Amino acid sequence: MPRADPSGHLNADHLVDDIGRRSIRGGTVTLGAQLVKMVVQFATIVILARLLAPEAFGLIAMVAAINTLLDLVKEMGLSSATIQRPDITHDQVSALFWLNTGIGAALALALALAAPAIAWFYGVPELVPTTRLLAIGFLLSGLTVQHWALLRRQMRFTAVAAIDAGAEVLGFVTAIVMAIGGFDYWSLVAQRLVSPAVVMIGCWALCGWRPSRPRRAAGIGDLLRFGAWVTGANLAVALTRSIDQVIIGRLWGPSMLGLYERALKLLMLPINNINAPIYAVAMPGLSRLATRDDRYRQLFADMMQWLAMLTMPLFAMVPVMADWVVLLLFGPRWSDGVPLVAWFGFAACYLPTMLSLGLLYLSQNRAGDMLRATLLDCALSIAGILAGLRFGVTGIAASFALTGLFVRTPVAFWLATRRGPVRLHDLHGAVLPSVVAALVAVAVVVLLRRCVIPVQVLPIVALCLGTGAGLAAALVTLAAIPSSRRSLMALRHLRQLRPREG
């Protein structure tokens, strides 16, 4: 039953006047927790890669590719609806809670019943019990969606960060202990169940809101329509990210899929851990400023510039150091994954900025535009994957990276800025200095490899030398460009990040 004043957990009007300070503080807290989470995830990838064979990761990836799509059906974009709406009632959130819970339970049951068919499709009998256990995760996450959204709506970033990092740590510990104990791929199954269970417990403990009994609520139709648009867009994104793994698993089996999935995971890990806190911090702030063009434009431009500076130079060096990365992190038996890591590193240069464009659609209540843009992006991505199919797994990775840079990103930038206060030149101005810095960093690393670093040097030494020199060159380049030099001045940046008055 709800508390006496359930609306206290829903009202966000008091956040507007102080939104700049809250965004800065929330960004600091969230980024700190995300760094902890990223370190844990990175350690998980490295340690488990040395404890388990590629086949184990490929087997779990076969189910995960399907689960990614179903998870978005369970969510239905209703967390975004709860965060984005300026005014929302207790009855509406209660209705959304029961809807998420019911869909989560239905999906868990459907996946459990479909387990034999999934195992038949891939030709791997072990997928039957694996799929049925992983189905439990849908029920756990269905119970969590609205509590998680309310914590973010209230900009309670410390609580969100603590839950997120805690779940990651406990899942990591569980997987490592079980892998050492000889449980093989079951350690990965356990990890995928422990983390959502911890998130559910944490959200219910730290969010005081409780749903009322199921009943109809006025205005729920608008929230469902918004959620449907968001879900459609997210499903298109998930399909883009999953179809390649489904094809590889079907055609080449779990071993090759394991190599592909681990290489992709290695590069997507930092991207997800960078973009997730940006969404968590910027979504509530931008939503509150959606009608204040100058403040909105300034906040988004600052966010985009810092995101590009943080990611582009670093990821640009990965393709020219991919062999060192694989030898150091995974070991010699993963050497076939070197070209995959190189191509995914190339893609990682632009993916964080491209993915952040979803904030423009969501915070401006342009879910319909987002769906249309995402469907087009999905079609372009799938076309690229199919074009690379004849060249094998490496061809798929190469096609994904190249079409993303030269086709998908320009189209995404143009579509996102056709409406709203942020224009195309704002995005170009935010990312161009980082593009220049990334090219300089790559040139420095290539020069070091050819003229300075011996071939027989240890991978860890070579990687440190190359990364250090490349980042130093990128920093000097950014400092030489006026717009990025201003952003590199931390104190001035903190003042600028507070959205300006219109």
Image: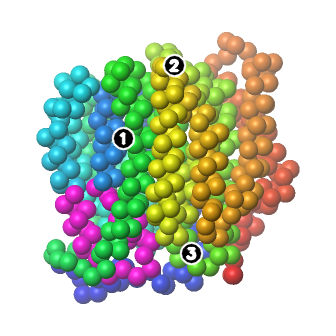
Outermost residue to the top: 456
Q: Is residue 445 rendered to the left or right of residue 220?
A: right
* Amino acid marked by disc 1: Phe
Give the vertical position of 312 relative to 233 (above or below).
Answer: above
Q: Pointer 1: what residue?
A: 172
Disc assigned to residue 290: 3
> How many residues crowd around disc 3 within 10 Å: few (fewer than 14), some, or many (20 or more)?
some
Give the vertical position of 481 relative to 215 (above or below).
Answer: above
- SS of the residue under disc 3: loop
Q: Pointer 2: what residue?
A: 391
Q: Please provide percent x and percent y for residue 31.
A: 54, 56
- SS of the residue under disc 2: helix
Magenta range: 74-103
Specify which label sits upstream in the sequence, 1 or 3.
Answer: 1
* Amino acid marked by disc 2: Phe
Quarter residue 158 falls in: bottom left
The N terminus lies in quadrant = bottom left
User: What residue sits 25% from the left and 74% below the top?
Assistant: 94
User: What residue sits 44% from the left and 40% below the top?
Assistant: 241
Give the vertical position of 300 relative to 293 (above or below).
Answer: above
Does the magenta-highlighted stretch encompass residue 263?
Answer: no
